[in-house]
Amino acid sequence: MIGAALVDAVTGLAYRASGDFSAVGEAHETAELTTLIAEGLHEAGAAGELESVVVTTSGLHEIVHAVPGRAPLNSVVLVLALERERANLALAVRETASLAESILT
């Protein structure tokens, strides 16, 4: 893992960060991206709330996963940056979902 952060998707405030999170940009940029994707999915008629977003570049994977349990909106997201050559993307997405579920419980 390169870095991780717990981010408020509405305000862009990073509640907590670990590692080198600069590899994926600022927390407010992640919040804006998450909001744009969620709004676009809603406008396209997608049912349900945004669960996760995966962005892959030539060097890394970025996983943004909504932390459940924040009614009425999932306004907190867990963001992970992983080295592409060292990470198993499918396993990382699964573990990120599990970690996100445990954050507020």
Image (cartoon, rainbow, N blue to C red):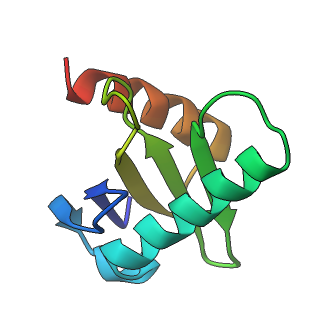
- Residue 86 in view in this figure: no
- Residue 61 in view in this figure: yes
Residue at 21% over, 67% down: 13
The percent position of residue 94, horizontal first and vertical second, equals 55, 29
In this view, which residue lies farthest toward the left? 16
Q: Is residue 41 left or right of residue 49?
A: right
Residue at 35% over, 46% down: 75
Please name whichever residue, 66 or 88, is drawn nearer the observer in this view of the structure. 66
In this view, which residue lies farthest toward the right? 44
Q: Is residue 6 left or right of residue 30?
A: left
Q: Residue 1 falls in which quadrant of the image?
A: bottom left
Q: Residue 99 falls in which quadrant of the image?
A: top left
Please name whichever residue, 100 or 82, is drawn nearer the observer in this view of the structure. 100
Give the number of marks: 0
The percent position of residue 98, horizontal first and vertical second, equals 41, 24
Q: Is residue 66 above or below residue 61?
A: above
The percent position of residue 105, horizontal first and vertical second, equals 19, 17
